Image (spheres, helix red, strand yellow):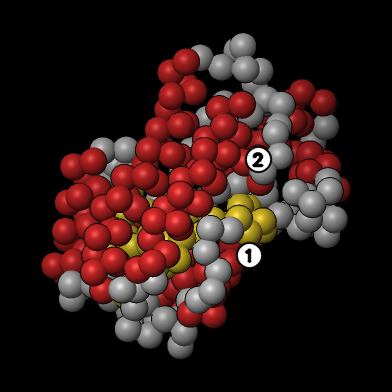
Amino acid sequence: MELAGRVAIVTGSGKGMGPSIAETLAREGADLMLCGRDLAALEKVSERVRILGRRAFVGSCDVCKSADVEAMVTNTLRMLGGRIDILVNAAGGTGPVERSTIDTTPDEFDDVVAVNMRGVYLTIRAVLPTMMAQRYGKIVNVGGTFGMRGRAGRTAYSASKWGLRGITKSFALEAGPYNVNVNCVAPGMVDGPRFRDKVCAEMATRLGISRQEAAERHAAEYALRRVTTDADVANACLFLASDASRQITGVDLPVDGGWAAL
């Protein structure tokens, strides 16, 4: 197993892509601290991780709150042997979907920037001293291809993911001399309830088509003509969290079927 003996923190591990990322790391041998705001969802993921034979602890954590993040890191060190080898920042928000910049309120803009940028800044800042001291660490931020190409109707989200790229590259330069890799996985649309019930539903209503037709229209924008899955993103995170990527840092890895390249 590629991650045997490693200790990983996965933020936002109760929902969205988080459970798949957590289970993929566990399947490869990592013990986990699962953190987020929905404890019931986190407990379900922890049960699946334990079935895989790995240790899993659950921590309530709002990544936008410094005190929560610091407490979560302290608990991870106490419960999992004093090491933190991997941090995957999967917590994030989408904000307004298909809404113009003018119609996006200042509070909505601030909320998305807070979770997608401040949250990542706080978690990296909290784990980095441990990783630097042990001269080893893998940090994987989950961004998005709207942070690589602009998108009308997604100003707040796109701005936050562009900003996340800057955070990734700056931390990579600071952490590199300590053998700590910092990279970003950039998914395209990821199939699941949020994609079907929010993104496709909005397009279906606006164009007078079915949700399935909306999903097919999104897939048609990609070179591979298919929408990304949770497993696709999890496998990319696994690669960047493993020593197979030892000489890669500060990069954006699109997992989008070719959308960002077109």
Looking at the rendered image, the disc whose residue lies closer to the viewer, 2 or 1, is 2
Q: Residues within 10 Å of mark 2 (few under 14, many from 20)?
A: many
Residue 95: x %, y % from top left: 53, 30
Q: Amino acid at mark 1?
A: Asp
Secondary-structure class at tag 1: helix
Which numbered disc covers residue 232? Answer: 1
Q: Amino acid at mark 2?
A: Phe
Residue depicted at 22% across the width and 57% down the height = 73
Q: Residue furthest left?
A: 78
Q: Nearer the viewer, residue 220 or 198?
A: 220
Name the N-terminal-most of marks 2 and 1: 2
Tell me the residue that label 2 is attached to: 146
Q: Residue furthest top?
A: 102
Q: Nearer the viewer, residue 182 or 89?
A: 182
245 lies above or below 95: below
Give left or right: position of 103 versus 223.
left
Residue 60: x %, y % from top left: 24, 49
Q: Say whether residue 51 is visible.
A: no
CA–CA distance in space, label 2 to label 1: 17 Å
Q: Say whether residue 258 is visible.
A: yes
Residue depicted at 66% across the width and 36% down the height = 199
Q: Residues within 10 Å of mark 1 (few under 14, many from 20)?
A: some
Give left or right: position of 182 versus 102.
left
Residue depicted at 29% across the width and 42% down the height = 62
75 lies above or below 93: below
Q: Nearer the viewer, residue 261 or 91?
A: 261
Which numbered disc covers residue 16? Answer: none
Residue 208: x %, y % from top left: 82, 26
Residue 216: x %, y % from top left: 82, 46
Secondary-structure class at tag 2: helix
Q: Residue furthest bottom?
A: 1
Residue depicted at 63% across the width and 29% down the height = 154
